[in-house]
Amino acid sequence: MKRLFTRKILILIVLVLAGAHYAHAQETKLKWLGHAAFSITTPNGKVLLIDPWLRNPVNPDAKDGKDPLISISKVDYILLTHGHRDHVGDAVDIAKKTGASLIANPELAGNLVKLTDFPAKQAQDYIMQMGGEIQIADGEVTVAMTEAVHSSSVFNPKAGPNEPERAYGGSPAGFVIMIRNGPTIYHTGDTAYFKDMDVIGESYSIDVALMNISQMGIKLSVRAAQSLRTKLVVPMHFGTFPGLLTSADGFATEIKKVKIGVYEMKPGETVVFKGKQMIGKK
Ligand SMILES: [Zn+2]
């Protein structure tokens, strides 16, 4: 009798632990590393890094002479919206350290390999253009590359005194990232507002839009959020260097007037999603 009771208790403990593990496994984590840099950890534990300029001045991990790359150990994919230095950032060092695969257009990928020593083997399997979608992370994540109205070029550290210091970077882009058992996240890249954001909003059910409010300006950032039909906006790409909006407060005031959710993340902060719902901070 006593043995049977002990067995029942054991089974119960195993079930509770399995349940806790399952609940934890269904979480998606989104971390803002400052500027346009975000990391996404999927329910299955895959790590995506978007526009990884981690040594930016507002990343708390880069302050007081700290090297933010020390705490970066696992990255599976690096997504680059375009070739400008505040977006390519530390992609080469991170790729070398983690073995992460590059998701970018072929011109940007090719010139990063040729001019900045990005590991060639990590810049071949997930090269894409706008249109269509690719599956990554064993099918857990689907990525669509979307239009962006901006420019793109790759800084060429090997350029001689009479050569252009910027090489071709293909077309700038944004990304829609659809996570199984997680949210659909749209990263605008550095785009200005464009009317076809309506099409992106019709085509995808966006839960969170990571929006470059400096590039669009406050008025058109609000318009963009409406076009995208996003449930939540996280403003980004402000307060990093002169010429950008210094804060997201003005935008937050305006977006609330049209009844779209806004969450002002702090650089270094992580938010957690259960399914498509943001359930809190970590
Ligand atoms: Zn930028």
Image (cartoon, helix red, strand yellow):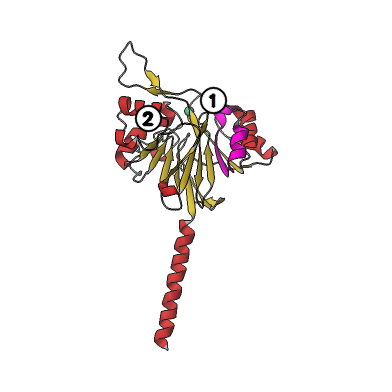
Whether residue 48 is visible, yes or no, is: yes
Q: Which residue is mark 1?
A: 149
| Apparent side of residue 249 relative to residue 138 in the rendered image (left or right) | right
Q: Secondary structure at mark 2?
A: helix
Q: Are marks 2 and 1 in contact (CB under 8 Å)?
A: no
Q: Is residue 17 above or below residue 239?
A: below
Identify the image quadrant of the N terminus: bottom left
Query: Which circle's residue, 2 or 1, is located before the other in the chain?
Result: 2
Whether residue 63 is visible, yes or no, is: no
- For label 1, being within 8 Å of ligand 1 is answered no
Q: Which residue is mark 2?
A: 109
Question: Which labelled disc corresponds to residue 81?
Answer: none
Report the Cα–Cα distance between label 2 and label 1. Answer: 19 Å
Q: Magenta span has 212?
A: yes
The structure residue drawn at horizontal position 41% and vertical position 49%, both measured from the top left corner, is 138
Image coords of residue 28 (percent x, y): 48, 50
Q: Magenta span has 140?
A: no
Which residues are the magenta region? 197-216
- Residue type at mark 2 is Ala
Image coords of residue 16 (percent x, y): 47, 69
Image coords of residue 81 (percent x, y): 46, 32
The structure residue drawn at horizontal position 45% and vertical position 70%, both measured from the top left corner, is 15
Image coords of residue 77 (percent x, y): 39, 41
- Residue type at mark 1 is Val
Image quadrant of residue 66? top left
Q: Secondary structure at mark 1?
A: loop
Q: Camera-side residue: 270 or 165?
A: 165
Circle 2 Cα neighbour tier, 10 Å, few/some/many (<14 / 14–19 / ≥20): many
Residue at the outermost bottom position: 1
